[in-house]
Amino acid sequence: GGKGTTVTIDFVNTPVTDLIKYFAEITGRNFLLTDDLKGEVTIISHKPVTVGEAYEAFLSALESVGYTTVTVGQLTKVVPTGDASSSPLREYYGGNIPYTDNYVTQIIQLENVSVGDVSGVVKELAGSKAKVIAYSPTNTLIITDSAVNIRRVYRIVSQLDVAAPRSRLEIIPLQNAQASEVQRIIEEIYGGDSSSSANSNTTTNDRSNRRSSSRRNRRSRNRDTPASSSASSTTVGKEGNFIDKIITDERTNSLIVLANDEAIQAIIDLVARIDIDVDPQSRARIHVVYLEHAKAEDVASVLSNLSENSSSSRRSGSRSNRTTQSGRGSLTRGGRDGGRPALPDAEESPSAVAALDGGVRITSDENTNSLVIVATPDQFEILSQVIKKLDIRRKQVFVQAVVLEMASDDTYELGLGVHGGIPNENGDGGFSFGSAQLGGSSLGLSQDSLSGLALGVYGQSFEVSLPDLTGSGTSTTLSIPAFGVALNALASNSAVDIVATPEILTMANEEAKIVVGRNVPFPVSTGRDNNGQPIVSYQREDVATTLKVTPQINESNFVTLELFQEVTEIEEDSKGLDVTSAGFITSKRSAETTVVVHDNQTVVIGGLIGSTDTHVETKIPILGDLPLVGNLFRGKRDVNRKTNLLIFLTPHIIDDPADLEEVYRIKWAQREEFIRRFYGKSKEEQEAELARLLRYSMNRVDQPSPWRTKPESHGNTEIIGGGDGGVVVEGTTATMDDPGPQALPGAAAEPAATDEPDGTEAGALPTGGDAGGR
């Protein structure tokens, strides 16, 4: 468009490429873009602007995302600002510099000061991506930066490049006072015409300095202020001392002084007396701190409590130090913990806490996980040290748990039965001792199929007619022995049941919870509707395995585990109750405790939780009580049941991603080993394999942990872990086999005759510690 054409620019989060296309249309320029051009910008104008003004806003938007333009003939290239200095930029001489964010090159010829002295000042004033070259042979300064920054630098350099015999540049940074206010005080004390005295002769300079000294002395007599008293003790009024220029840089809050050595020293002395912390609250600033690991809300709460309670903490802290530095406990102030040791910086701590008294405001932003702090520089410095110690990457803990129910159920049954029969007169029935009907028990023998040891003799059989019970019109006959004696003896026991093997990963000092199970409906109330139909109300409850653990790690890699383990299961109903009305029978096994265990070691929690002895005797009245022959008419059943619930816990500290990689590799190897041992095998073979692994894991000696050792390489084979218990990984296939027989003192070792090669841990306890010794 023409120069007088106006446009409305309103771009919100617009990609840079789309913005360039728009300005190419309205300006008629040809733009050259690179493939890696990216970024979004926002330009909002509430009223129409000219095309030239819009293009300046476009250049500013490009500069904000790290790009600028370079014009080559009729082509405008969009390049990163870091590459602008090596591009053919337009050169400017003198003060005719455009007011734009476009990058240009300015050449400044210095006449009175050395380019080496000025270049140091310019580098501090220029932008972070500016390029400053000092060419000493011609005393020339070459600057490549945005035109806006170069205009400011050129203005400062022009004021510095004045004739000043024996003058040098000095940058005086200020910590508390504002640079413009200090400049005003210095000019008021030493005279505002000191800058013009640089071009006069020495006599004029001396007269100017003497007049300034006279005015200063008169003000000192009229008002006794810190500034005037400080000025009266300086040596600027001496012959030959003068100030050429004083310039302020608000960005760095510094004074740029051009003067001789004596005057510079006098100004430094004066600034030291003025630049003091008079009112800390007046210097409060807003600081934003982005956190990397900790939650901003938690850190803000800690810092807020620290600043709010600093006064009371300082008073109680001084008393507590006097009480506890002896290292002994006290029942009075601060001694309930058994005498905490005094802090190494005990004398400096009260002053640090006192610096936070009042005026500190802290809030958090959840979206950016950052802290917004309003505090003075001194207060913020103290808070920054605390934030640095709180915002650290916490360790993680991978907890493996195995819940075993070891039920020792010993059953002994012994029964002796005698039976006999004679046909009745009709030939369609019989008589049996111990039962009045066929199929009944024979004295002390069970009605079930005989098991265990069963011996017997029987006599000649006879036929017994059975009535038609099916309605088919046909009768059946049953052949039974006329006489028989049977002996049944049975002994049985049960072993180990693996209830659950939960595993969970959590951060230190954070509670983790895992629930695996079902949500089962339980009847809570019953009734009937108007039609007499039953109505049952249900409430769902979890029937599951629950593991809640909170780990805490100390510097010695000991892990404190706050543990809650609960296993709930539905039991079989031996009484045949209706579950729709009576509900399910559930069993609950839980343990809640706190233990301390070293990294990669296994601890066992639990023990004997029940013991039941049952003795059942069945007999025929009178006959079973007869001496000697009474054994032929009775049987007995003894049951001894002991139940143990054992929980095996093994924590693994995760320091870095390499430890997580080790967890993955070992779990994958265990999966492959599980498939190798159990897939495609019969139930008997699987039970035998499981018993072998359990026996091995209970008897093994501690092995070096595979979690934290550096892998060893043998050709294309890598062994994870130390000792003979490493996980062998070759290519992408991992195997884990039982090691050779190793046993604790007094424990039964695994038979030596085995075809299993050496490997690493497997089975119910895939960890680096023994389960039976703890």
Image (cartoon, rainbow, N blue to C red):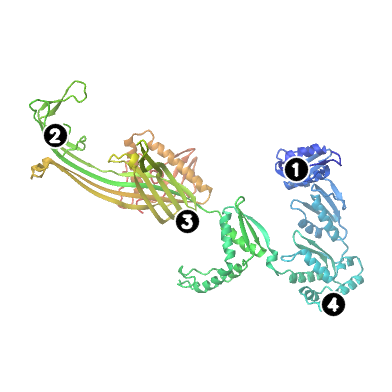
Query: Which quadrant would the C terminus be assigned to in this image?
Result: bottom left
Which residue, given by chain and number where applicable, does mark 1 sit on? 10
Taking 208 as reference, is 142 above or below it?
above
Query: Which quadrant would the N terminus be assigned to in this image?
Result: top right
Q: Position of residue 680 (x, y in %)?
A: 37, 33
Taking 541 as reference, is 114 above or below it?
below
Mark 1 vs 2: CB contact within 8 A: no
Drawn side of residue 73 relative to residue 364, left or right: right
Identity, as a three-letter code, of the amino acid under mark 3: Gln
Q: Position of residue 688 (x, y in %)?
A: 32, 39
Looking at the image, is mark 3 or mark 2 earlier in the sequence? 2
Looking at the image, is mark 1 or mark 3 earlier in the sequence? 1
Identity, as a three-letter code, of the amino acid under mark 1: Asp
Which residue, given by chain and number where applicable, does mark 2 sit on? 436
Which residue, given by chain and number where applicable, does mark 3 sit on? 552
Q: Secondary structure at mark 2?
A: loop
Q: Residue at x 19, y 20 (%)?
A: 473
Looking at the image, is mark 4 or mark 3 earlier in the sequence? 4
Mark toward the viewer: 1 or 3: 1
Q: Nearer the viewer, residue 471 or 608?
A: 471
Q: Nearer the viewer, residue 503 or 681?
A: 503
Mark 4 vs 2: CB contact within 8 A: no
Q: Which mark is residue 218?
A: 4
Mark toward the viewer: 4 or 1: 1
Q: Rounded to the nearest whole Å, what is the CA distance between mark 4 and mark 2?
A: 139 Å
Task: Identify the image quadrant of residue 381.
Answer: bottom right
Q: Secondary structure at mark 3?
A: strand
